[in-house]
Amino acid sequence: MKHLLAAVATAALIVAAGGLTASTVAAQDAIYHSAPEPMAALAEALPTPQLILSPSAGVAPRRALVAQPYGIRAIAELAEPELRLAGFRFNPTTYAKLREPWGLTYYRSLALQDFPTGTPQPVAGLPTTGRITSVEWSPDGRRVLATVAGFDDGQGHDLWVVDAETGRASRIEGVFLNGVLSPPCRWMADSQSMLCRTVPADRGPEPVRTALAIAPSVQSSEGPAAPGRTYQDLLTNPGDEALFDYHMTTQVAVVGVDGRVTPVGAPTIVDVAEPSPDGAWVLLSERVRPYSYQFPIAKFPQRISVVRLSDGARTVLAEKPLEDAVPISFDAVGAGPRAPGWRSDTPATVYWLNALDGGDPNRDIALRDEVATLSAPFDQPARTLAQVPTRISSVHWGDASTALIEETWYKTRARRISRIDPTQPGAPALQLYAGASDDRYGDPGEPMIDANAAGAPVLDIAGSEVLFSGPGGTPEGDRPVVTGLALADGARREIWRSPSDFYEEPHEVLDDGRILVRRESATVSPNFYLTGTDGRETAVTAFASPYGDQPLAQRRMLHYTRADGVPLTATLYLPPNYKAEDGPLPTILHAYPAEFKNREAAGQVNGSPNRYPEYGFYDLPPLLAQAGFAVLFNTSLPVIGEGEAEPNDTFVEQITAGASAAIDEGVRLGVVDRDRVGVTGHSYGAFMTGNLLAHTDLFKAGVALSGAYNRSLTPFGFQREERTYWQDPELYYRMSPFSYADQIKEPLLLIHGGADDNQGTFLIQSERFYAALKGNGTKTRLVVMPYEAHRYDARETTNDLLWEWTDWFTRYLR
């Protein structure tokens, strides 16, 4: 292990400009630094455990699974073997993903408790090494499946079944799972078997990349325009294709709790395998050749079929070509059937969505999307249930006469929820809600979901209402709400709302009307409670604070106004022992700009002052308050484009106005020293950081993490911008801080993951921006974090990041 970590540290590329030469500085700094205490201890604390209830339709009494999220990891885990093929990264020895841009939820341990007031008992028999990659209750609530990657000396991806009565886990021998494209197993309706995606036992040796790669890499385009965003980890040559076939080919199988394995069809590249609610059929989505070197697997040709488990008979429902001609628009989709799935309220009926406009939002057409269904034995024409004027984003099934369709239209930020009656195909949909997708104050949220006797997700319908859970946005902050929408006319009835002095998030409405909530406040760590509308409550868990008695930063939500009248917010963090007489502090402003189409939505409050701090990667900046800084965290920087205007038409002007307003408010409160303010952000926030330093004199230093700085390298759109480089080259030039590197006079630290996997934020963005800054004489430094993707996950990286932040801002703000 010591040799591995030494090699990893040496691999860190750290370059600085200043009195020393680049090679001298790189040699002396190529180590991981330790974060100042108590930052390191706070950042390494484990997240609050999750509570996963057994199904309400299962056996009584119900039980709860207490799952401890994995938390921070060692750099040695990120240095495990990894292949990058067709847009996916995975460990070829475990067939599990090491990372995703927005993080994975793996678990360290599992416990069971009687619900609601039992004492958690650790599950016995589970391995203490490896990562628990997924868990799921059986429909009858008697068992839990758990998939575990890498417990056998870093090898394998295995299936375990936990007996909820005894609390003991047993391994299903001889089953090697493939969890690259999706969770590898799910329960069948009988609760005695699971449908799994497994690695074929007789696949032979792995193709040798070096031999296969000795061939020309050819791409050809002789058809229509095929625009594509800047995807990462694509196939690049025939050798990659051979490795893709070898590692992505899976054998779908029914695995019994008794260990019996029954293959379903032949091994193919399967990205979706779902059992029907009655357990008699399997819906398969397979990816077939020809592959693409320009697009990830989700765009590859697709075959959609159903297989009857009793005899293996297959019915092909659709064959789709490569999706390489989808317009650059967030309202565009591929032509033909998409998003196939099972109706969860019937024994065996497949549904899918279909774009009536061919997926092109620029076509002038009255009805754009439809829902179609086809029932077993799948030998009749499909039925159209409903056609709607905008794009269907999801369908939720309830009972024989109730389903909900959710539509969105990004161009106008429109959102609509309608009810359809599946027994009356073609009848007009009944609108229950219409509003803006970014309207937090009016948003009812999402339908609450329950599991039926087959374990399939169905709408939680209470009498004549369907239950929704929403953020409950208010001008004082989020107060989550449970709402009933009348199925007859959409009339809304508020059933429950979080109190104003706590943040309570609803998880389930029980049959007796009580609600399971996760409760926390700014000073009280999260726990679960059962609460009733009559005020009665029952404590379900008693998790201790992960931070012990360590003093935490002071916090308050600020409300202020931009110069043009748009209301804004920021969360202010101050050192634990700060007193008003201490006066103004050096300050760090953190933000992530957001686009809006109207001022009202842009001015709404997002977040709550009652959240307990959790210091995952995206919430690390507040830890800088422990080092004596004031921190303006999640500072509102809305970018608004009303009517025919687009938000990015005035991007720089609007982020400047928002940042200036936040600083003014901090100065007014007497806690911000206007002459000592730094700025930091990640991804689009890093892009923002570069622009604020290039175009304003508000800041004395900046730290930018994993950003994109030259927009000509993302020519087919970026973030939420739909215009291409060729449609508006001036916009791309004007929004690129790279274009104005000669105007950045303040010190700028660039940090980037050496294995960044996000669209557009290639490492070259920071490398070329560093070269531009250095060439123009700016004080700058580039730190490349080994093995880290867009999100940084390792303990060593987190410590080094906190040290870099603290050191940089201490040097240039104090």
Image (spheres, grey):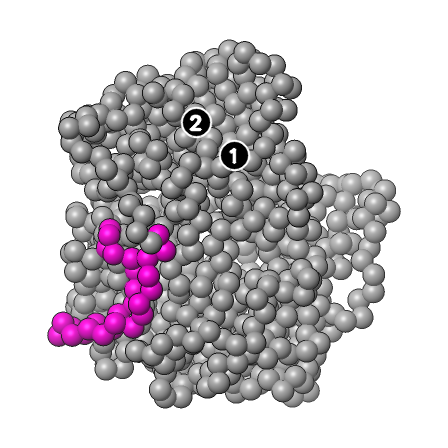
Q: Quadrant of residue 619?
A: top left
Residue positioned most to the left: 534
At x 40%, y 88%, the residue is 59
Main secondary structure type of the part rendered in magenta: loop
- Judged from the image, the secondary structure of the residue bearing numbered disc 2 is helix
Percent coordinates x, y for residue 711 in the rendering: 51, 29
Percent coordinates x, y for residue 423 in the rendering: 38, 81
Judge whether residue 468 can be spotted in this image: no
Q: Could you give the CA–CA distance between mark 2 and mark 1, rounded to whole angstroms?
A: 11 Å
Q: Is residue 4 left or right of residue 17?
A: right
Q: For residue 807, which numbered disc appears in the image?
A: 2
- Label 2 crowd bin: few (<14), some (14–19), many (20+), radius 10 Å: few
Query: In the image, is residue 417 above or below residue 562?
Result: below
Q: Name the amino acid type tagged 2.
A: Asp
Along the line of sight, which residue is nearer the eye, 46 or 428?
46
- Which span is picked out in magenta? 521-547
Determine contact: label 2, label 1, CB under 8 Å: yes
Query: In the image, is residue 361 above or below residue 479?
Result: above
Q: Quadrant of residue 685?
A: top left
Q: Is residue 308 left or right of residue 577?
A: right
Q: Name the amino acid type tagged 1.
A: His
At x 52%, y 67%, the residue is 134
Q: Is residue 147 magenta?
A: no
* Residue labelled with disc 1: 33
Quadrant placement of the C terminus? top left
Percent coordinates x, y for residue 69 in the rendering: 46, 60
Q: Is residue 602 left or right of residue 726?
A: left
Query: In the image, is residue 94 above or below residue 627?
Result: below
- Label 1 crowd bin: few (<14), some (14–19), many (20+), radius 10 Å: some
Query: In the image, is residue 709 above or below residue 311?
Result: above
